[in-house]
Image (cartoon, grey):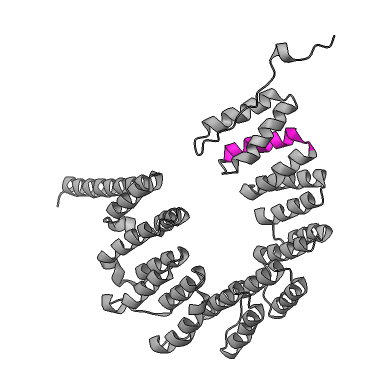
Amino acid sequence: MSFSQLLQRAFSTTTQASCAAATNNSLFTVVYKERNLKRLVEKFKKSSEAYRFRTKSGIYEDTVRRLASAKRFKWIEEILEDQKKYSDISKEGFAVRLISLYGKSGMFDNAQKVFDEMPERNCERTLLSFNALLAACVNSRKFDKVDGVFRDLPEKLAIEPDLVSYNTVIKAFCGMDSLDSAVSVLDEMKTKGLKPDVISFNTLLNAFYGKGRFADGERIWDLMEKNYVSPDIRSYNAKLLGLFKDKKTKEVVDLIGEMRAKGIEPDVFSFNLVIESFVKSENLEEAKQWYNEMKKCECVPNKTTFEKLIPFLRKQGDLEFAFELCEEVFKRRFLLDVALLQRVVEELAKASKIEEAKKLVELGKTNDYRRYRLKLPELPSESEVPSDK
């Protein structure tokens, strides 16, 4: 083969690859940008005809999440059942994706059906699909199904539950508020030669601290250390929540210091708890200081940050800072209660901060993600303003 022929073949292959990549990228873009959910379903099914599209689990997660948020469960079933016509369904990983998506949507019966159909589709069922079904029980809050799946299927499938399996059972017991039973799972794990990990303990810590059982949470913390499991950011956030519920503001701040001393930087959840602690104790300056500390650490505030701070700033009369945070809400395109923003507009106008009030109204109109119908309150005309004479 001549050099020119080799060059032509290489160019042709590269061109084909580039065209394929462009086509696939356009498929993802078309699905991601579709706002009409009915059209989204049709475009998703059409795009699924491309193998490369079916390899992208992220777009499946995003699409199903959007439909579940809108409670369009029939449409979730429509797009996921449509996937069964592809040869991918004979691969356990693909079947597990469908089981997991159904589980996260609260559609356990559909998840169970996918699992039960796997043998007839020449798809092997291993520990991977067993754990996916177990997780679907918990995510669907079908806690009554967990025991049957956990006790019956391992023998039927000739598998042994692993650490992931037991962690899911712990999560199920915590979901049922059977916290003592959840702790007892640690003993069963020990008899099976399994060592609990940070996920095992974090699940328990979140449950005990979150339920206001601080002393029991501390007992689990000690047990974690005795098992030589190092706490991570989630462990500390659980403890911060426990301290917050006990109204121990000083201890909340002290724990942040302990985290940093151990090289664990607080995240947005950590900062929100500190801020809310000072909001609860009506300490305006500390609440503002910790918000600024969050920004200083390049930790991005989330929706909860603004939901907690803006009403507090209004109540404390700090309309200037409340206005700044409202601007930030529009900048970050958060979906906040329109009534919360409307009250800021009204109080700005009442305090003669007319330009700021007008700016928020305009920002609400031009926000490209969600239009906020904010209204400027009627202002008295110059002729209606009482004379000083």
Residue displayed at 51% across by 78% down: 144
Residue displayed at 35% across by 73% down: 113
User: Residue 348: where, in percent of width, then height?
Assistant: 71, 29
User: Residue 210: where, in percent of width, then height?
Assistant: 69, 66
- Please, what is the dominant secondary structure of the magenta stretch? helix
Q: Taking the image as drawn, is residue 19 in sight?
A: yes
In the rendered structure, the answer to whether residue 227 lies left or right of residue 283 reads: left
User: Residue 264: where, in percent of width, then height?
Assistant: 70, 60
Asked if 222 appears above or below 330 in the picture, the reply is below
Q: Is residue 104 magenta?
A: no
Asked if 289 appears above or below 236 in the picture, the reply is above
Residue displayed at 60% across by 40% down: 338
Asked if 172 appears above or below 148 in the picture, the reply is above
Q: Which residues are magenta?
A: 317-332
Q: Quadrant of the C terminus?
A: top right
In the rendered structure, the answer to whether residue 9 lies left or right of residue 216 reads: left
Query: Can you tell which quarter of the image residue 334 is in?
Result: top right
Q: Is residue 329 magenta?
A: yes
